[in-house]
Amino acid sequence: MLPRLSEKILAWYQADKKRATIVSACVALVLIVLCVAAAASYRNLLNEQRKAQEVQDPTKPQTAVYKGKTIATPAYVLEITPEELKSLLDSKQKIIIAQIDSYADYLKGHISGSSFLSKDEISHGVTTFTQTNNVVLVSQDGKEAALAAKELITRYGYSRDKVKSLQGGIKAWEDKGYKIEK
């Protein structure tokens, strides 16, 4: 059957070369359009993968794609406001405050009773507290503290309820009029 079809196409092509050339050009154009569409689809897929790999704010609900649908997942890190932290400190509740900025930033100003904890210590899971302690991580603007808290929670198994970050960091603490030690 296939040789017979080939013979018919060849005969049709020889009989009407102009029309056959137009059909061939149309087929080529369709193939080009299909290739472009496939390339665009692949590019979109790569962009979606790139977006998924971007660092999301660990204090905001995260998004994930599950069975083709985008869903929200809980935030990794719970934040505590400067007012809530001040209230806990005033009530003498046992809480560990660790500032994770550079040591120079720690010396420039830190919350009374806080200790310095380097980012290297956190990235290696070396801390001066255990997973049962209530811990508030502090940084200058709160972002580094949130990322450090996320690492302790996701990588080292600390509980979201036990490790929190100070919302807005030292800047927010000072903006509320609370004192820092130098």
Image (tube, rainbow, N blue to C red):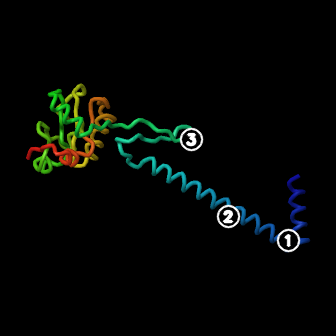
Task: List x then y, in percent, for residue 162.
Answer: 27, 29
Q: Secondary structure at mark 2?
A: helix
Seen from the viewer's position, the closer of residues 50 and 142 is: 142
Q: Earlier in the sequence, mark 3 or mark 1?
A: 1
CA–CA distance in space, label 3 to label 1:
45 Å
- Residue kind at label 3, given as amino acid type: Gly
Residue 164, quarter of picture = top left
Task: Tell us which disc is closer to us: 3 or 1.
Answer: 3
Q: Secondary structure at mark 3?
A: loop
CA–CA distance in space, label 3 to label 2:
28 Å
Q: CB of mark 1 within 8 Å of CB of mark 2? A: no
Residue 123: in sight, yes or no?
A: no
Task: List x then y, in percent, for residue 139.
Answer: 22, 45
Residue 83, quarter of picture = top left
The residue tagged 3 is: 68
Task: List x then y, in percent, for residue 132.
Answer: 24, 25
The residue tagged 1 is: 19
Is 54 on the left-hand or right-hand side of 153?
right
The residue tagged 2 is: 32
Question: Is 51 located above or below residue 122 in the figure?
Answer: below
Q: Residue furthest top?
A: 132
Q: Residue at the location (38% across, 48% down)?
A: 55
- Residue kind at label 1, given as amino acid type: Arg
CA–CA distance in space, label 1 to label 2:
20 Å
- Residue kind at label 2, given as amino acid type: Ile
Question: Is 111 located above or below residue 29 in the figure?
Answer: above
Task: Tell us which disc is closer to us: 3 or 2.
Answer: 3
Q: Secondary structure at mark 1?
A: helix
Q: Residues within 10 Å of mark 3 (few under 14, many from 20)?
A: few
Residue 78, quarter of picture = top left
